[in-house]
Amino acid sequence: MQDAIWLNANIATMRDGSPYGAIHDGVLAVESGRISWVGPRKEWQGQVRVEHDARGAWITPGLVDCHTHLVYAGDRAEEFELRLKGATYEEIARAGGGIVATVRSTRAATEDELLATAQGRLQQWVREGVTVVEVKSGYGLTLEAELRMLRAARRLKGITVRTTFLGAHALPEEYKDRSDEYIRAVCDEMLPAAAHERLVDAVDAFCERIGFSPDQTARVFDTAKRHGLPVKLHADQLSDLGGAALASRYGALSADHLEYSSEMGIKAMAHGGTVAVLLPGAFYFLREKKLPPVDAMRRYRVPIALATDHNPGSSPLSSILLVLNMACTLFGLTPEEALAGVTRNGALALGMQDSHGMLDAGKQADFALWQVKTPAELAYAIGANPCAQVVRAGQIQPIAS
Ligand SMILES: [Zn+2]
């Protein structure tokens, strides 16, 4: 006896082989929080406790947002306004703006305050069919504040959370001109403490001229490896420092941004089994011009994932559906590639491919129902939300409107 089935549905399983792995007039069965059967209705047989009529909706895997900075305090709307009134970065920095402002307010917030604001933001993700979200630290930049961010992220409800330690996000003011010393603190104190408390699913760094050098990044990655933790990297966003290749050398789960990555870097990612995570929200908000090398990614068969990169500085974006549209309009992805980017490949970028990202028997029963005629509509529409229902681990999720 199955717990429940959804019938009268079109199902985008996202399996390889046919466009969207589509099954028309399909049935999806759930038992004990897992998918127990998925296929055409005419082949379905079995007994079931509850039948849900999907009324012709499309069912996709629960969406995965594999790169966010969702936990922080304060916002930067004032700085946005100043910038558009013509203030320079220097003037904004002098007025206390920039990442320093977010670090200051995050350090001043309690764990409960960080949790409450992040939980409020997260509603939007659930409303748009997201069932898995990755959350990074990186606005605390002290041992205590980084742990507080990670603890708050782990307490988020209504969604499956993966936490990433990003102590090497920015150089805190008190370490001005002493970045090697700060990296030592990250490697010797912060990361070991966070790992010891089991708050870390992966380790990330910001490898950039305005962030940390490839050498410093490698030191962080070596420490991650010693703790048996997988790595990810903010790579080649504003310049090519060889971040994609560096990440691949460490078998990184993903290298993210990648606008300036070279073909060699993409080739290295293919060898390293590293997913390319594209973040069109930051590209748009910073009005970048250099496009990520999508053709090279296709040529070398590097899986492409997409994410919001939600953060108060460079991507104050709370809509995964808008990410799909941006990836198509700005980066030239097809709607199917875009949907794969927030399902199958998003799960891969978090090492969750065995349980998430596709609709297959045995996987966790995470899926979303959409009132659309074709899955392409999810990427085509701007500002619409056709999500009708979200199911996580077999349970229909309450969605606040
Ligand atoms: Zn980021």
Image: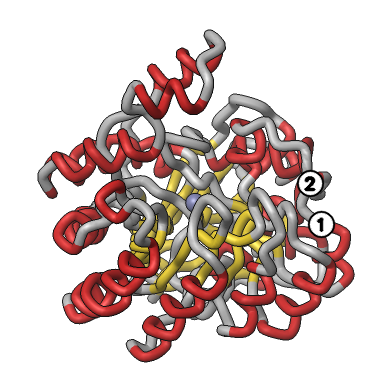
Residue 239 image position (x, y, % from top left): 69, 53
Residue 375 image position (x, y, % from top left): 71, 46
Relative to residue 44, is residue 162 drawn left or right?
left
Secondary structure beneath label 2: loop
Residue picked out by circle 2: 291
> How packed is label 1: few (under 14 Cα within 10 Å), some, or many (20 or more)?
some
Tell me if I can see residue 41 in this picture: no
Secondary structure beneath label 1: helix
- Depth check, mark 1 against mark 2: the one in front is 2
Q: CA distance from mark 1 to mark 2?
A: 8 Å
Tell me if I can see residue 44 in this picture: yes
Relative to residue 92, is residue 232 drawn left or right?
right
Relative to residue 294, is residue 355 drawn left or right?
left
Residue picked out by circle 1: 294
Pick the front one: 19 or 350: 350
Q: Amino acid at mark 1?
A: Val
Q: Please give the name of the residue rendered at 79% of the width and 46% of the height, measured from the top-left corner.
A: 291
Pick the front one: 282 or 19: 282
Tag of residue 29: none
Q: Quadrant of residue 137?
A: bottom left
Image quadrant holding the N terminus, namely bottom left
